[in-house]
Structure formats: C-alpha cells, structure tokens
Amino acid sequence: MVTAQLYAVFKRDMMLAFRQRSELLQPVMFFVLVITLFPLGVGPGAQTLQKIGPGVIWVAALLSALLGLERLFREDFADGTLEQLMLCGCPMSLLVLVKVIGHWLVSVLPLLLVSPLLALFLNLTADMYWALLLTLLIGTPLLSLIGGIGVALTVGIRKGNVLLSLLLLPLFVPLLIFATAAVDAATLQLPYNGQLALLAALLLLATALAPLATAYALRVSQN
C-alpha cells in the first residue's frame, strides 16, 4: 500500500514536470548560459579557464538547482495537495524523499548530462572532469535534500525565493569547498578519495535526517 502511494506521488510529479516544459528547461538553460558567458568576462586563456572551470561549473550547478527548488512543495501547498498527502497515511518523510528524488531527476540530472561539453569548453583535462563528475553525482543530491528543508520552511511565505536563497547558500559552502578541493587534487595528480568520502558521509547523513526535518517543517507550515 505504501509503495503504491509513493509510486503514485512520484508518477504525478514526473507528469507535472514534463507538462511544464518551459520551467523544466530553465535550470539547464541557466547552467549553460552562466558557463558559456563566464569566459567572456575572464578571457579565453586556456590555463585560466582550466583553473577556475570546476568552481564555475559547481557554482552554476548550485544556482541552477535553486531555480528548480521553488516548485518542490509550493504548488502542492497552494492547491491543497500537500494537506491530502499528510492525511493519506503514508509516512511523510518517505513522501518527502520521493519528491526530492523527483526534483533531482528533473532539475539536476540534466545538468550532469550536459557537463561533458561544458568541461571541454572550459579546457578541463580528463582527470579533472572525472573528479568533477564524481563530486556532482555525490554532491548534487545533497543540494536537493538540504534544499527541501529550506523550501518547507518558506513554503507558506509569498515570494519566499529570496529568503530561501539566503537560508540555503551558507549551508552549501562546505559542499562547494570539498567538491572543488577534490578537483584541485585531481589537477595535481593527487588522490581525492578523502574529499569524496566526506561528500558521501554528508550525503548519507542528509538522506537519514533531511526528510525527517523537511516533514516536520511542512507540518509546521501547514498549521
């Protein structure tokens, strides 16, 4: 019964996302535009682009993920779906986890799919790209999990996207530091297993605690 409810919520979120194709493309277009325009400001030097490229891609991915977070719970809150989900008998933390996974698949996974072309554009080496891809695979779900808490806290506030950014951006700083440190280590042909392990530990911790915190914040916002 619970599995069927979770699948129904996931299927509904996917259908709604693909019906709103303009909003679906916004994070990807923003991601591509930021990275392609950045060399115009710093110059086309290959060494300069290679040095700053990983940080640029990560910052662009972070900001692009914030664009899609706004839709995570706000529409459900506005049309009463969120209240019905709380009354359906399914653990709210599991419903939150399913919705976060849906957000990652729709808003963040496309960023990873276009990252190889952008890595070539920024003159990243193969070692740098693979390190960058691993940090994105481990770190971007963390963006969605932590972002879910922020969205739940601000879901009842009109035009709360500015407040959401102010809440979340400081929390993403450690993630950005560890991710770029891993790519810097790959640039110097050094092992970066330690940075990946720290990112994985943060992801496991967020997977265990973030859905519970988000579910509690949603109940508070609903009341």
Image (cartoon, rainbow, N blue to C red):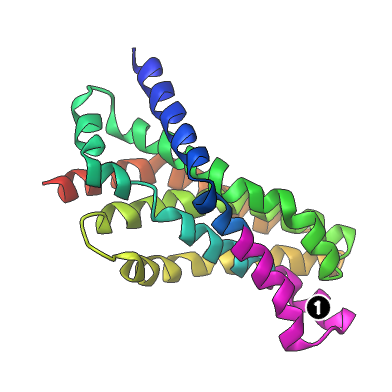
Which amino acid is tagged 1?
Leu
- Comparing 142 with 181, the one in front is 142
- Residue 140 position, x and y percent, is 57, 52
Q: Which residue in the rendered view is the most extreme toward the top?
A: 1
Q: Which residue in the rendered view is the most extreme toward the left?
A: 223
- Comparing 212 with 124, the one in front is 124
- Comparing 163 with 202, the one in front is 163
Was residue 154 drawn as part of the magenta stretch in this picture? no
- Residue 219 position, x and y percent, is 18, 43
Badge 1: residue crowd in 10 Å (few <14, some 14–19, many ≥20): many
How many marks can you see?
1
Can see residue 179? no
Range of magenta residues = 29-56
Give above or below for 178 relative to 51. Answer: above
- Seen at 39% across and 47% down, the residue is 72
Name the residue beneath numbered marker 1.
49
**Principal secondary structure, stretch drawn in magenta:** helix
Was residue 32 drawn as part of the magenta stretch in this picture? yes
Q: Secondary structure at mark 1?
A: helix
- Seen at 76% across and 80% down, the residue is 39
Residue 93 is left or right of residue 110, and the answer is left
User: Which quadrant does the N terminus fall into?
Assistant: top left
- Residue 174 position, x and y percent, is 52, 67
Can see residue 209? yes
- Seen at 70% across and 70% down, the residue is 35
- Comparing 31 with 124, the one in front is 31
Residue 158 is left or right of residue 11, and the answer is left
- Residue 6 position, x and y percent, is 39, 24
**Residue 124: quarter of image:** bottom right
